[in-house]
Structure formats: structure tokens, C-alpha cells
Amino acid sequence: MDSEGPLGTSVESSGGRPWCGYKTLLAKGNRFMAQPKIGIALGAGGAKGVAHIPMLEALDELGITPHRIAGCSIGAVMGALYASGLSATEIRDKIARLAITRNDTMRGMFSDSKISKWMGMIDSDFRRGGLIKSESIMAELCEDRACETFEDLVIPLTVVATDFWERRAVVLDSGPLKPAVRASMALPGLFTPVEIDGRVLIDGGTVNPVPYDVLTEDCDVVIAIDINSGSTAERGSVPGYFSAIFGAIQIMQQAIVEQELRARPPDIYIRPELSDFRTLHYHKADEIYQQADAAKQELKRRLAERLR
């Protein structure tokens, strides 16, 4: 059942909760107020990407709707969910329903089908270039979203991927949404590369881990969220196989971001202090949330200062 909301917004009832009405209302309401256009870029970082959720909660708690969102890799996933109309709290709930945590009992994992969901995401055809099917993850996260294209989103979104053969960044902000997000998160060796318009695309974090630069022309205040914090491992210890591979990627990403920060820093740069969570450590989401809380409070403080 649809009803007419304030400012002419259409609110669609679904179990008593509007699908994306409140964010549509805020987006329209912001146009009537002399507020700066705020853009937020959500960076790459595997499971550490759940730290983006507290940052988005900061926006919700301040009543701020971004003018545009940019995302790369896991940041593209979180950005797409938020831009579709979900609140940060609803995104947190989605992660909780999908991730296997220490609080899950064996009976609970089977009754909630968590194990079968993750088993179904494994790509048995390793010749495709990845171990996990990104389309399965996107299907789980977007099961109740009707947004199939960028144009369907409540908030404009830009995602960054990498053209494997041209060795350069590819900016995607129109057309089919899910293939673009899958391309942006296609970490080599883990997720299968994605073909779009004849181009083979992989994780955007290989060239632009925190893509705040795509927001500068369209936004008055640019926020960059960098979740690739330094390692807390004991110095001198020899990393294992996966730690060496993904650690090398993080070193490369950190070097790229540091160079960008020197050349053209964003208005607000936030880097949560996170421990050594590996790429697939989604079962440690609660720990990541706790460690990201200080950065969330910093973001709220700095935004409040900007908006005075």
C-alpha cells in the first residue's frame, strides 16, 4: 500500500517500514536548505569494510544525506546498499544475517542456512580466475532491493574498478548496478573478474583504493574513509601464505593513498585504527565495529564543526 508522505514523497509500506522513504525525504529536504553538498568515499579493505557502517551511522545520526557516494571494492558494496535507501542500521543487520560469528550455535547456523549460503558462494570452476562467486554475495545482500541500475538509486553513486588489460581506473556511475559493484570488488585470486562492455575489470583498489577524487568537482565537502590501517603484527615475524598475498596488496594500496593525500587531500580524512583483520574475517564484525567507534565519533565531531 502506497501513501503520500511529506514533500510529496511516496512511501511504500512493507511490514510497517518504508522501503527507502525516509532517505528520499531527506534527499529532497536537503535541496530546500542552504547546506553544503557532502560527498563520502568508502575505501577498499575486505572484511574491514564493515567499519564503513559506523561511518554511515554517523551520517544518519546527524541527519545528513550525502549528495553523492563513491566506493571501491567493499566500499562499493556498502555504498550501493546505502545509496539504495537502506539505513546504516539495516546494513548492519544484513551483515549479521550473512556472517558466521562466534555467537552462532551450530544449530543456529544450519537453521539460518548460513553455512549453505557460504558453500553456495564457492566457485568450483577455478579456471574463471576466482575462488568465490561475487554474484552470489551480491544476490544475498541485495535480495530485498529493487535497484537494478545506478539510475534507480536514491543517492547518486560512483564506483571504481580497474581495467585489467589497459592497466587503468574505470569509473562507473550509470547503467547496470550489480555488475559494476562486482567488478569493483573483484579482488584478484579471490573473486572472478567481470566483463563489462568488452573490458575485463578487477578490483578498483589496485589503482584507487579510496576514490574521493571522483567527488571533488560535484561536492562542497569531501569525506574519505580509509579502512586500510597499519599492521599490528609482531615485527620480524614471517607472514603465512594468505597474509603475505593480501598484506602485499594492502601495502600497495597504502602507498597509493599516501600519494593522493599529499597531492590533493580531502576535506575530512578518517582512518579507523583497526587490528589485523584478514580479507574474509567477516565473523569478527562485532570487533571491527567496536574498534571503529572512535573514528565514528571523530567523523561526527568534524562534520558538526563544518556544518555550524
Image (tube, grey):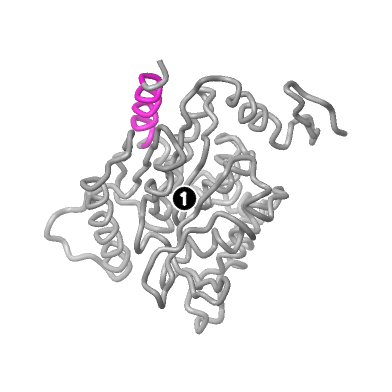
Which region is colored magenta?
292-305
Where residue 256 appears, as percent x and y from the top left, is 26, 56
Farthest residue in the bottom direction? 127
Where residue 75 appears, as percent x and y from the top left, is 46, 50
| Front position in the image: 93 or 185 | 185
- Magenta stretch prevailing secondary structure: helix
- In-image side of 220 versus 274 (left or right): right
- In-image side of 188 versus 121 (left or right): left
Where residue 143 appears, as percent x and y from the top left, is 69, 52
Reading the image, the residue beneath label 1 is 71
Q: Residue at x 47, y 78 (%)?
A: 129
Farthest residue in the left direction? 236
- In-image side of 288 versus 158 (left or right): left
- Residue 20: image quadrant is top right
User: Is residue 302 shown in magenta?
Assistant: yes
Where residue 251 appears, as percent x and y from the top left, is 24, 59
Farthest residue in the right direction? 1
Count of marks, rendered view = 1
Residue type for callout 1: Gly
Q: Residue at x 32, y 39 (%)?
A: 266
Q: Residue at x 23, y 65 (%)?
A: 239
User: Is residue 38 shown in magenta?
Assistant: no
Secondary element at tag 1: strand
Q: Residue at x 54, y 47 (%)?
A: 157
Residue 116 position (above or below residue 15): below
| Front position in the image: 20 or 189 | 20
